[in-house]
Image (spheres, rainbow, N blue to C red):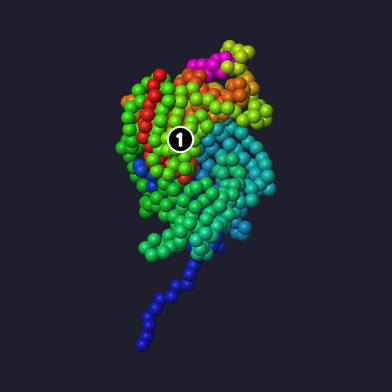
Amino acid sequence: MILLTSYQPYKRLWQVSDLEPFNEWFQINWQGQVVGWAQNRLTKHNGLFKVHQQEHFEGRVRGQRVKFVYEQTFYFETQPPYRIQKGESKLLEPNMVMETNFLNGDRLTVTQSRNQNTSKYERDSINFTLPQYLSWRRFIEKRPEQGDSLQSKSLDPHELILSSNSFTVSKVPQGRHQRFELLDSSGNRLQVNRQGRLLAERRGRGIELVASRNKPSFNPEMQTDLYTNVGLPINKPLGEIENIKSLHIALKGDNSWLGVHPSASIQGNTLITKQGAKYLANDRDSSTWSFDRTSEQVKALLPAIAIEQDPKETVQQLVQFVHNYLYYQPTPTNFTIEEIINNGYGDCTEYTQLLLALLNEQRIPAREVSGYIYLGDEEQRFGGHAWVEVLLDGEWVGVDPTWNLTQTTAGHLPITIPQEKSVSDLDFSVEQIHYK
């Protein structure tokens, strides 16, 4: 008997000495709808390995069309240790363009522009290599077992700082599911085939990348509003939230992962919020609170504010000043405090940051609170929001410069959803409404 067989020796795809070019496309989904595309590509260019990554997000936020583009290109040596030689990156967000270029020789030389403001600097060189960039793919080729872990390094394309990340194998190929599943230290989940190709990546807040044969296409005009889409719908209208004394919300299922701020309370499976909520501060809050150095632009605003001797009156003046100084515009971009002052607009994030900077200058302890706020009976849902709590007379008191409030309403929902969860994981309903 003659057996005819074909034998092909096993080849490691991610052995850098034999590395071949590749190109990967991904569709980006958010909360169940298509919002963009991503690409990972490796080629050889002018005697160097060129790694190019890009992600494009596009959609509507509160009726305004927004676009986000993130691109980065790293160039590595083609000889051991395959050290990074240079790179460039670009960040494009609403009203924000940031570009970074660097050379990594005996010293790291960086040129960076942020909205056309350019800076140059030098610092110690970076020890980052192509094997480190490919670390989790190389890890998969070794056929890890469930529970095995990997420590990897990644390079921030703008800060140019190396950070560590831990991957743990949560699932291995079996039966019809021929894929590995990796969980990283940020709560992201990767699904990878036996060849180390990324099949899907689930990030925090419901963002998911799914592998595609070609560049995905989508129509942003067919999307629902992205801000509304990540809101929390409720089962009944609340009316004017300024007239609500307290709100009782029934939490369904296991919500042990839900973060609840001390200004609200949970009794059994009921979340309770109150108008003008406040709570006692820890003794350490006032005795060990540290204040940051104030920028000159923040100081320049103070003569326009009628600062009072009484801290409570000072807070009231600052809340009103910030509310009047900025005009509201949805701004899904992270601005510096100087940019916020120069722009003169923003959403709740910018209102919060400006108030915090002014309170810091007045040496009044304050911090940000994130959560949700009731958007009114027309929408009948809570939307993402941020406000401020201030330490006054031994108590933390909530204020909201976006709405010009020196006390928060029962419609301020101070809860946080972990990165690995999304709003669709939270199931609740309004149980009781107590009006004034």
Residue 318 is covered by the magenta coloring: yes
> Camera-side residue: 139 or 268?
268
> Camera-side residue: 402 or 216?
402
> Camera-side residue: 82 or 261?
261
Name the quadrant of the C terminus: top left
Number of numbered discs: 1
Furthest-bottom residue in this view: 1
Point out the stretch of residues depicted in magenta.
Answer: 313-325
Indicate the position of residue 321 as horizontal and vertical percent values.
Answer: 53, 16
Q: Is residue 364 left or right of residue 136?
A: right
Q: Is residue 234 left or right of residue 262?
A: left
Task: Judge whether 23 appears above or below 228 on screen.
Answer: below
Q: Residue beneath label 1, please?
A: 267
Indicate the position of residue 219 as horizontal and vertical percent values.
Answer: 33, 39
Indicate the position of residue 392 as horizontal and vertical percent values.
Answer: 59, 21
| Residue 99 in sight from this viewpoint | yes
Q: Which residue corresponds to the image point at 41% horizontal and 62% vertical from the top-left?
A: 178
Indicate the position of residue 307 as horizontal and vertical percent values.
Answer: 60, 13
| Structural crowding at the residue carrying mark 1, measured as other residues with C-alpha within 10 Å and reported as few (<14), some (14–19) or many (≥20) | few
Q: Main secondary structure of the magenta part?
A: helix
Residue type of the residue flagged with mark 1: Gln
